[in-house]
Image (tube, grey):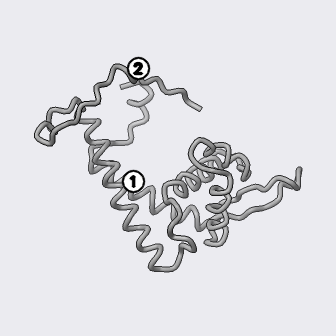
């Protein structure tokens, strides 16, 4: 995992209440403000998508955290695209700072019921359960990713791997 350096010490940050009249003076640059707007746009899209999933009967337990579920799907799909199949235990380890093993297992149960994941015993060690994504997961993922690309573009972000590699 990547170690993040913030350069900020808790004692060096004032905890003064900000007044709404000063909203334009907060020390965020245009890119940072665009990222906030991007996150809010994604949240709005994600909320509407969830309403549609509930309405169409896709979610067995609609009260579970969509953010945990989205990250579980993202992790499993991304690793699978890299040629790695994750186990239930590995997924739980990624999320141990955020939620319990039981919560992760319940999310995975929901995903299996919805047809987006399949649990299959590891042929090398039958005690390990491999999490196999289905085509349905990638179809839903494609919808999500297209929405995220469109939202990112609306906020000024462009995929440019050459520029990113040069550190610009």
Circle 1: element type: helix
Query: Which residue lies under the disc numbered 1?
Result: 148
Answer left or right for 154 relative to 105: left
Answer left or right for 82 relative to 45: right
Which numbered mark, 1 or 2, is in the foreground of this view? 2
Mark 2: give few (<14), some (14-19) or many (20+) Cα within 10 Å: few
The x and y percentages for residue 91 are: 66, 49
Query: Which residue lies under the disc numbered 2?
Result: 7
Residue at far bottom of view = 56
Which residue is located at x 27 percent, y 36 percent? 31
The x and y percentages for residue 112 are: 67, 67
Q: Quadrant of the C terminus?
A: top left
CA distance separating discs 1 and 2: 30 Å
Total marks in image: 2
Q: Vertical placement of 2 versus 59: above or below?
A: above
Residue 65 is tagged as none
User: Which is more N-terminal, label 2 or label 1?
Assistant: 2
Mark 1: give few (<14), some (14-19) or many (20+) Cα within 10 Å: some
Which residue is located at x 40 percent, y 20 percent? 9
């Amino acid at each position: 995992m990547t170690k993040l350096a913030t350069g900020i010490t808790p004692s060096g940050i004032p905890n003064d209440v900000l007044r709404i009249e000063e909203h334009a003076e907060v020390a965020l640059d245009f890119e940072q403000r665009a990222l906030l707007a991007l996150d809010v746009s994604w949240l709005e899209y994600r909320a509407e998508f969830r309403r549609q999933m509930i309405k169409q009967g896709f979610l067995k337990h609609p009260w579970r955290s969509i953010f945990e579920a989205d990250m579980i799907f993202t992790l499993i799909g991304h690793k699978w695209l890299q040629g790695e199949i994750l186990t239930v235990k590995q997924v739980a380890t990624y999320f141990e700072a955020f939620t319990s093993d039981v919560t992760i297992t319940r999310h995975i149960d929901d995903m299996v019921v919805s047809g987006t994941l399949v649990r299959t015993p590891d042929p090398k060690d039958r005690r390990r359960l491999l999490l196999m994504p289905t085509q349905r997961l990638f179809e839903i993922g494609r919808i999500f990713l297209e929405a995220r690309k469109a939202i990112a573009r609306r906020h000024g972000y462009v995929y440019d791997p050459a520029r990113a590699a040069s550190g610009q």
